Image (spheres, rainbow, N blue to C red):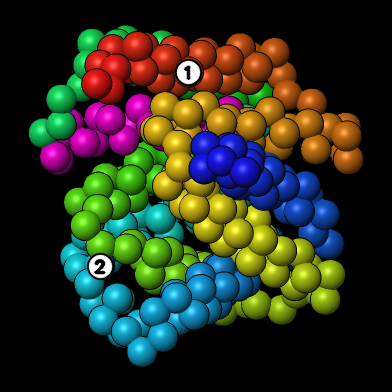
Amino acid sequence: MSGRARGIWLCLMAGGFWSIAGVLVRLMEGAGPWEINFYRSVFLTLTVATVVVWRYRGATPAMYRAIGWAGVAGAFFAAGSNLCFILALSLTSVANVLFMLPAGPLFAALFGWIVLRERVMPVTWAAMAVAAAGIAVMVWDGLAGGHLMGSLVALAGCASFAGFVVALRLGRNVDMLPTISLAGCVAGTVALAAGGGAIAVTTQDLALCALLGSVQAAFGLIAFTAGARHLPAVQLSLISQIEIVLGPLWVFLAFGETPTWATLAGGLLIVGAVVGQALAAARARPAPA
């Protein structure tokens, strides 16, 4: 199998892993968002830390120190994104949450312009405007349908993930995988405090949280990171959109949960803006000599 084909399959696997979050959360017997976030974070931390130790052996402490302040900041942003994602799923539909996710790269472009002084192409500004319109439609729909808080939390999660992306760019010269396990520690601590220390869950819910942390989150991230070695950024951004398609589909097939027309319209505007921006950036990039 060629490197490109391997990269495509790895990114498809990552999108598949990420897409099962909604179904797993809906299958919970009684665990609330803070209990889910706590145990998901524990299993995420254990899984990623195990991978880091297996990869670096005795150099593991040095790898954690190497992430620096950028890695620490990135861990807090990633923790915020993880917390918001699960909390939003408890407040609104899976489709409403997932259709917000493509706005993340556009937030990242905006934050990169502010923090890193990275140039933003006119087509990216246009994409931000279109995505903002889509977000406005979904937030308005949430207000009308009594799910405004869910939409706002999902949006906050997107912005937090964008902060994580900028932190990764700042620390791009080192392996930032330790940041993910640190993020799990931060998210678990916040969830434990926010939940008042209540962590009692059923055996079924604990198993589902283990799948959320070790498979849905950790394996998805590991597969995506591995695929990124073989594909250009534009293909990564396009292939990862499979999560947006599969996530609502699984929940519809399992529970009959359907998105509103406004959610679909707003989501299509956001996805269209991201895909259009990615394609335009690929055309603008000069061909290799």
Q: Which mark is residue 275?
A: 1
Which quadrant holds residue 97?
top right
Pointer 1 local density, CA inside 10 Å: few below 14, some 14–19, many at least 20: some
Residue 285 placement, left or right of 151: left
Q: Is residue 117 above or below residue 269?
A: below
User: From the image, which quarter does the C terminus lie in?
Assistant: top left
**Horizontal and vertical percent for residue 175?**
32, 63
**Horizontal and vertical percent for residue 82?**
50, 54
User: From the image, which quarter does the N terminus lie in?
Assistant: top right
Q: Is residue 108 above or below residue 169?
A: above
Which residue reaches farthest left?
117
Please identify the dominant SS of the magenta region. Answer: helix
Which quadrant holds residue 77?
bottom left
Q: Residue visible at 66% across and 24% down? A: 145
* First-in-chain label (2 vs 1): 2
Q: Which residues are magenta?
A: 97-116
- Determine if the magenta segment contains residue 194: no
Q: Secondary structure at mark 2?
A: loop
Q: Which is nearer the eye, 224 or 131?
A: 224
Q: Is residue 106 visible?
A: yes
Mark 2–mark 1 Cα distance, whole angstroms, equals 31 Å
Q: Residue visible at 59% across and 37% down? A: 5
Q: Is residue 139 visible?
A: no
Q: Which residue is mark 2?
A: 67
Q: Amino acid at mark 2?
A: Ile
Q: Residue visible at 81% across and 74% down? A: 202
**Horizontal and vertical percent for residue 74?**
31, 57
**Horizontal and vertical percent for residue 151?**
54, 33
Q: Residue visible at 24% across and 53% down? A: 172
Residue 106 placement, left or right of 247: left
